[in-house]
Amino acid sequence: MNQAQVATRIPTEETLQRPILELVGIQKHFGSFHALKDVNLSVQAGSVTCIVGPSGSGKSTLLRSINMLEAIDGGAIYFKGEMIGQEVVRRRRVPVSARKARQQVLNFGMVFQGFNLFPNLTAQENVMVGPRLVRGTDKRQAAERAALLLDSVGLKNKGANYPSELSGGQKQRVAIARALAMDPEILLFDEPTSALDPELVGEVLAVMKELAERGSTMIIVTHEMKFARDVADEVIMMADGQIVERGLASTIFTNPRTERARSFFSSISKQ
Amino acid sequence: MQVSITDSDSNLVTDESRASAALPIGKRASTARWISYILAIYVVVLALEFFVFNRNWHWDTVFSYMFSQQIMIGLGNTILLTIFSCVLGLIFGIMAVWARLSNLWVLRTAAGLYIWVVRATPLLVILLMIFFLGALVPTLGIGLPFLEPLVETPTNQVITRFTAAVLGLSLYLGGKSAEVLRSGVISIDSGQFEACKALGISQFNAYLRIIGPQIIRVITPSMANELITMFKNTSLVSVIGFAELLTTVELIYSRNFKTIPLLMVAVLWYLVLTSLAMYGQARLEKRFGRGFNRRVGLSPAVEQQATEMVVLDEQTETQTSRGEGR
Ligand SMILES: Nc1ncnc2c1ncn2[C@@H]1O[C@H](COP(=O)(O)OP(=O)(O)O)[C@@H](O)[C@H]1O
Ligand SMILES: [Mg+2]
């Protein structure tokens, strides 16, 4: 496996000092429903942040807002100090143009709960299609890179298979390779293993763990507490559209400060 | 406790029954099948009597006209009309569905009105209205309303029989195919659009390269229906006197009164062209079914080959040839 071509960047002294991503006072409504209530978060380059919390607490909405799949209606998101998603034009803040949004979204790679692979493309074509269409990479180069990436997620021989011919765990690993192909600065995972049969969860988590060890910046919504304890630098708990507790992975599960977090952790550890 | 499948201590299975396990498995004799054969033979004989032994068909006349110059010109016109109207109609349809799904309400409303009117108006009326447009607006021009137009030509110079036919048919097809296309768009899982967005793929490229092929797969049967209907609808342009196949046929039998044989000439040609269209449909379904139709019945060796990583430029070629074998 070719590390240099697959690995994301190694964090340097400088990038470690300032957060690569900052969310300030994020608000989001769906009609009259208040889905995100003043969410503040900062993420250091090279760190792994796990987001946990009960269903409907706004975890997906938060990830989707970062990735501009949802438009926020208050607050701001800063990537490397620069506001993304919106810009100030003649002293008014407006959404960025579609073109600029496409540029900004390249900073993030998204892995969805339901894979969202393109069913009409083979595994390898799924990984190639982003670089081909967005960066104009030539076909041979894109194919070689895709082969390397598939190799790195343990799918060396599955490149010619269509998604319908792959297991859930294999599909999700293709999806990870597809996200990596665009060389994103931050990887976003929205419950990447929740749609998988229990025996397939491990293979996906192993790939994610390897990415974390290589220094990728990752934000992961997950219910896998053991994984979070092993891999996360910081764990964030959300409830009712707010961050209710945050802490080091080593302490938050064993010593939650709020009653809410305590009952949530005990309810999922019972399962 | 040890359980073995070959353990035959129980003697529940007789030796005779055990021996029959080696017999090959054949088809079960079924009364329904025999009845269906007898019925089929009956129908074939009836059809022979009707088509071959009934001299009123005048098959010799049919074949003498089948490739006659006049019919060939009419057939050529029908094909030309079909091709022009299909291409233009699909362009109208794509524009209409794009406008219909736009986030600008002006576009949405315009497309909605167009589709509404086309669905409500019989094709015959559309054709006549366009052909007689000259009566409504004597000249066509470009410019602002109520002001002198910048360029101007007499309507009757632009609207010939052929352009009226093409315009009428394609406006009609545009409205109908817009709805078919829309049904394709809404059948696509929103996750597909989100994945494209997350990869930074522009909407145009997403539709062209990723979502489009999936839409084509879904809509091929109903779109083929629309196109075949439209091809037969070309016969309606005889009301404005454009000499396509059916009009030509009518012209001939109004002179020699060999009505049935000449209609048969048209029917045979329509059968040939529809068969071509259906062959095209089958090819499309196969092509755009890739990734959806599971590969079945492949030997393990072929499966193995199929899963081999293909890195080189031949990639697409191998895939298409494999696609046809599926
Ligand atoms: N598109 C939407 N329209 C309306 N309500 C939504 C939409 N998306 C999410 N919600 C609501 O927002 C809340 C948070 O959803 P989500 O972020 O998906 O929660 P989680 O991922 O934590 O389970 C839920 O109550 C959900 O019903
Ligand atoms: Mg969710």
Image (cartoon, coloured by chain):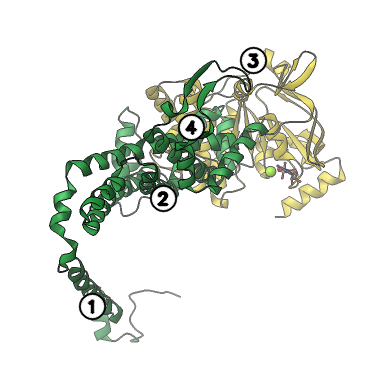
Chain colours: A yellow, B green
Q: Mark 2 points at which residue?
A: B225
Residue pictured at 45% horizontal, 47% vertical: B124
Report crowding for label 4: few under 14, some 14 to 19, many 20 or more residues within 10 A (C-alpha).
some
Residue A200 visible (yes or no) = yes
**Residue under circle 4?**
B134
* Mark in front: 4 vs 2: 4
Check contact, mark 4 vs mark 2: CB within 8 A: no
Badge 4 and badge 3 in a common chain: no
Q: How far apart are marks 1 and 3 (CA)?
A: 84 Å
Instruction: Give the percent coordinates (x, y) of residue A269.
Output: 72, 51
**Labels 2 and 1 touching (C-beta < 8 A):** no
Give the image quadrant in which the ligand numbered 2 is located. top right
Q: Is residue B298 above or below residue A93?
A: below
Image-based side of B261 in relation to B311, left or right: left
For the residues labelled 4 and 2, the Cα–Cα distance comes to 33 Å
- How many residues crowd mark 2 within 10 Å: few (<14), some (14–19), many (20+)? some
Distance between mark 2 and mark 1 Cα atoms: 33 Å
Instruction: Identify the amino acid type marked 2.
Output: Asn
Residue drawn at 79 percent across, 34 percent down: A246
Q: Distance between the residues labelled 4 and 3?
A: 75 Å
Mark 1 in CB contact with mark 4 (< 8 angstroms):
no
Residue pointed to by mark 1: B38
What chain does mark 2 sit on?
A: B
Q: Is residue B37 left or right of residue A19?
A: left
Same-subunit check for callouts 4 and 2? yes
Under tag 4, what secondary structure? helix
Q: What residue type is labelled 4?
A: Gly
Disc 2 versus disc 1: nearer the observer: 2
- Provide the residue designation for mark 3: A12
